[in-house]
Image (tube, rainbow, N blue to C red):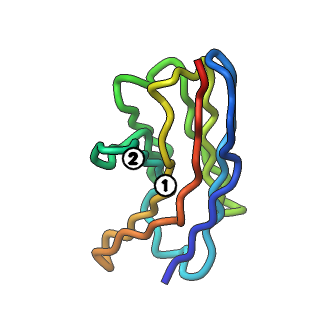
Amino acid sequence: QVQLVESGGGLVQAGGSLRLSCAASGSTFSINGMGWYRQAPGKQRELVARINNGGTTTYTDSVKDRFTISRDNAKNIVYLQMNSLKPDDTAVYYCNAWALREGRNYWGQGTQVTVSS
């Protein structure tokens, strides 16, 4: 089992920045990668960014050049630096970790990000 705890959400004005953090604990040796998803009211949960154990990153088009995902492998923490935030970025952001051998996806409890115009 893997436990994920997010922090860093909040309220920010458009154009501002926030950094989200997600700390993994438990059977972290099984993790193949970590990432961030978000879900806005009335919308489906969508991938924001992810990073695998090799350091390869993937971003959804709407956040490219504004968000950066990074990972501290020694501390099992993944970060999401969010710059030039827009009201459309308002959502609950969820940390995710996947373990291929176990066929498992793990989720954090979510952290609210609100961007005011």
Mark 1 to mark 2: distance in Å? 8 Å
Residue at point 38%, 23% (across, down):
62
The residue at which mark 1 appears reads as 94
Q: Where is residue 97 in the image (x, y as percent from the top left)?
A: 45, 63
Q: Where is residue 54 in the image (x, y as percent from the top left)?
A: 47, 49
Q: Position of residue 58 (x, y in %)?
A: 39, 36
Q: Is mark 2 on a helix, strand or loop?
A: strand
The residue at which mark 2 appears reads as 39
Q: Residues within 10 Å of mark 1 (few under 14, many from 20)?
A: many
Number of marks drawn: 2
Q: Which amino acid does label 1 sit on?
A: Tyr
Residue at point 56%, 75% (across, down):
3
Q: Is mark 1 on a helix, strand or loop?
A: strand
Which of the marked residues, 1 or 2, is nearer the chain's N terminus? 2
Mark 1 or mark 2, whichever is nearer to me: 2
Q: Are marks 1 and 2 in contact (CB under 8 Å)?
A: yes
For residue 107, what is the image quadrant?
Answer: bottom left
Q: Quadrant of the C terminus?
A: top right
8 to 31, vertically: above or below: above
Question: Along the horizontal axis of the image, is 106 left or right of 14?
Answer: left
Q: Which amino acid does label 2 sit on?
A: Gln
Question: Along the horizontal axis of the image, is 5 left or right of 55?
Answer: right
94 to 116, vertically: above or below: below
Q: Position of residue 92 (x, y in %)?
A: 50, 48
